[in-house]
Amino acid sequence: MSKQIQTHMSPIIGYHRAPLSQKFGAPRQPNLVALMSAIEMIAPFDTPAAFVGLEGFSHLWLSWQFHHNKDTYNSQSFRAQVRPPRLGGNQKIGVFASRSMYRPSQMGLSVVKLERIDVVAGRVILIISGADIIDATPIIDIKPYIAYSDSIEHATSGFAPAAPTPSAVTMTVNAQEQFAVLVDSDIKSRVPISSKSVIEDIQQRLVAADLPLIKALIAQDPRPAYRRNEINTSFTMRYKSVDVSFCQVATGELQISSVVEVV
């Protein structure tokens, strides 16, 4: 007979709105790619009064939920060990020595940059960058990042002492032409008239500035660790309203081969 597991329910205070709607392609850690996204607060947590003073902080701690996990946690499904991509996807370590999504709480923690606080029709939307979380992720809590206490000068980072080296990324002429056709040419600044319009720009509207971000995401090499030696095998990352296909070519770099609008 298994022991009863004590649980605690946390309210969802908002949802992450981002260009990436699938796990494939999302950075494996925060602040590896300066990807713009937003947190859409929900009532009653969207009142501007709750954010007075936050504008003085450059970064935020986000607590969030791994909502794409297929299984909910119970004592039978607990995974004591996981295989981090950083170690090639083969070596096992303890789940509490990792940032794996398969953990008892199914909760994540990220530091992100606060770009600005928008108030649209009386509702707060936080514009952030550097998040390693995908679209529609439930946000559980927001706290300001305190530099003097949250940054530990002599901390050690175990099997991940430094950021991984980005891969070189190239793009075929065909892919460049496809991207150019799909870019929204209306680059005039628009005054947001609703939270919906702000979110649609982040989730769907493809602009020229998205191309270096797409390349930066692919440079992190989102392929499974055990498939990183495959040559000319196509992988597809969904970004906003397009599917971006790429593969590793014989010369070693990752090459974007097509940019196709999602139908």
Image: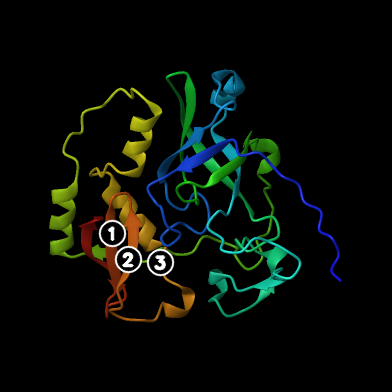
Is residue 254 visible in the rendered structure shown here?
no
User: Considering the image in quadrants, where does the C terminus appear?
Assistant: bottom left
**What residue do we see at 65% from left, 77% from top?**
92
Q: CA distance from mark 1 to mark 3?
A: 16 Å
Disc ID at residue 144: none
Query: Residue 74 at x, y = what percent?
Result: 73, 63
Query: Residue 72 at x, y = what percent?
Result: 64, 60
Q: Residue furthest front?
A: 1
Q: Amino acid at mark 3?
A: Asp
Q: Which residue is mark 3?
A: 221
Which of discs 2 and 3 lies nearer the camera? The answer is: 2
Q: CA distance from mark 1 to mark 2?
A: 6 Å
**What residue do we see at 30% from left, 51% from top?**
212
SS assignment at label 2: strand
Disc ID at residue 236: 2
Query: Residue 187 at x, y = what percent?
Result: 20, 33
Nearest the viewer among 138 and 249 is 138
| Labels 1 and 2 touching (C-beta < 8 A) | yes
Q: Which residue is mark 1?
A: 243
Q: Earlier in the sequence, mark 1 or mark 3?
A: 3
SS assignment at label 1: strand
Nearest the viewer among 51 and 6 is 6
Nearest the viewer among 251 and 27 is 27
Q: Earlier in the sequence, mark 1 or mark 2?
A: 2
